[in-house]
Image (cartoon, grey):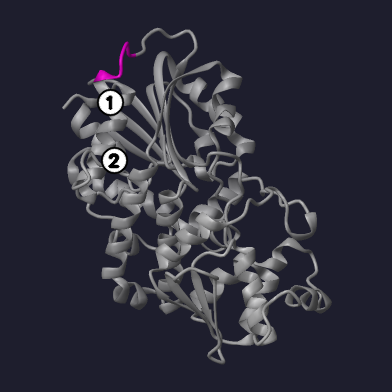
Amino acid sequence: MDGIRTESSEHSQPASGNYRGLLATEPRGMSPVARLVRRVLRSLGDPPLEFVLWNGERVAASGQAPVASLRIADRATLLRMCIRGQLELGDAYADGRLLVDGDLEKAIEEVYLHAPPVQEGALPGGRPRHRRRNTLERSRDNVHHHYDIGNDFYALWLGETMAYTCAYYPTPAATLDEAQVAKMDHVCRKLGLAPGESVIEAGCGWGTLALHMARHYGVTVRAFNISAEQVRFARERATALGLTRQVEFIHDDYRNITGACDKFASVGMLEHVGTDNYAELGGVIVRCLKPNGRALIHSIGRNRPKLMHPWIERRIFPGAYPPSLAEMMQIFEPWNLSVLDVENLRLHYARTLEHWWAAFEQSRDRVAAMFDERFVRMWRLYLAGSVAAFRVGEMQLFQVVCAPGRSNAIPWTRAQLYAS
């Protein structure tokens, strides 16, 4: 959804006088409002979409059959879209003031594909758009906003594993649960887990990976998480599986991790760390990892530095920032950590999100009963937009394996990754 923006998002103060100039070049016979919408479409790169106004007028990209129609409820919604751009588009959809007739994911995908290049790091008018530093207190607030909204909600659509990260599909026909188990085995093989080893996991979600490591690889795990809801769930799972002696779930921030380990894993946490804290995370890895140890970082990322979509950052994932590979190197370079392996699982995440979205839609009535219809539409937009982002390459999924620079205890080939 990062490509969604309006003509006025290029200017700090879209005065009414500017609109007259914008409309002057549009075809005659269209109302002034319709001509403004036509300019909005052109600012998006003319994706094959159709806007339907509250008065019945239709405005479509020229020369293409629309993949979806976007119905704008009233004049106020259109004006807010022109002033607030990306944020208003998401809010209008969530409120039901912007309705989509057709394939929602395909509509967002087309916007991505047609969007003109956008200069990063600035708001309209050239004002710098800074990321807020993820302090310990702010990180707790951010995690609470997204992850502590209810385990029952996530259980409706994450599948049996309750894994909320990219799965790994050994075949296109694999189910979501099969792919999540395959992802955990993929991670464990990359780490080279052996019975008796100790593992530290930073950001453990609902405990799925830590419990899998203990059950199937004979290791002990200390798993850290600042989500109270997730830690409570993970501890209950460990008790039910009889793994409390092998797995300890600790309600604390990664910055407070202490102790030594053979292997270090972080799957799906880096997006919430913030680049300002990357060197500190690298310091934690070096402090904990034994001389011949190995670490893995699994994170949503980008091909180049780019800010999070403002609607997703404001409404869904506050404080989130998917890094580029160059930015991720700020974790490793200051501490002489050798990068051993880099893999991009982008299309696997697109498939994962398709499965999540389908399960979410099957449970939409239960979600609405838990929250409300606005919440349903908000999360539908988030999931559909995420599918589109990974399909078109707007988002990536990186797995990076590293080891202390002087360690020679590293794989000779990649054969162990694909051993059955």
How far is disc 2 from disc 1 in space, using C-alphas? 13 Å
- Residue stretch rendered in magenta on the structure: 411-415
Q: In the rendered structure, which disc, 2 or 1, sits on the residue that comes first in sequence? A: 2
Q: Residue at x 49, y 81 (%)?
A: 96
Amino acid marked by disc 1: Arg
On residue 79, the disc is: none
Which residue is at the front of the view, 311 or 217?
A: 311
Magenta-span inclusion, residue 226: no
Q: Which is more foreground, mark 2 or mark 1?
A: 2
Q: Residue at x 36, y 50 (%)?
A: 350
Classify mark 1: residues with Cα within 10 Å, few (<14), some (14-19) or many (20+). some
Q: Quadrant of residue 83?
A: bottom right
Residue 44 on image: x %, y %: 60, 63
Q: Is residue 197 above or below residue 2?
A: above
Residue 156 appears in view = no
Q: What residue is pinned by disc 1? A: 189
Tell which of 215 and 189 is nearer to you: 189
Mark 1 residue element: helix
Please name the residue shown 34% across and 72% down the image.
367
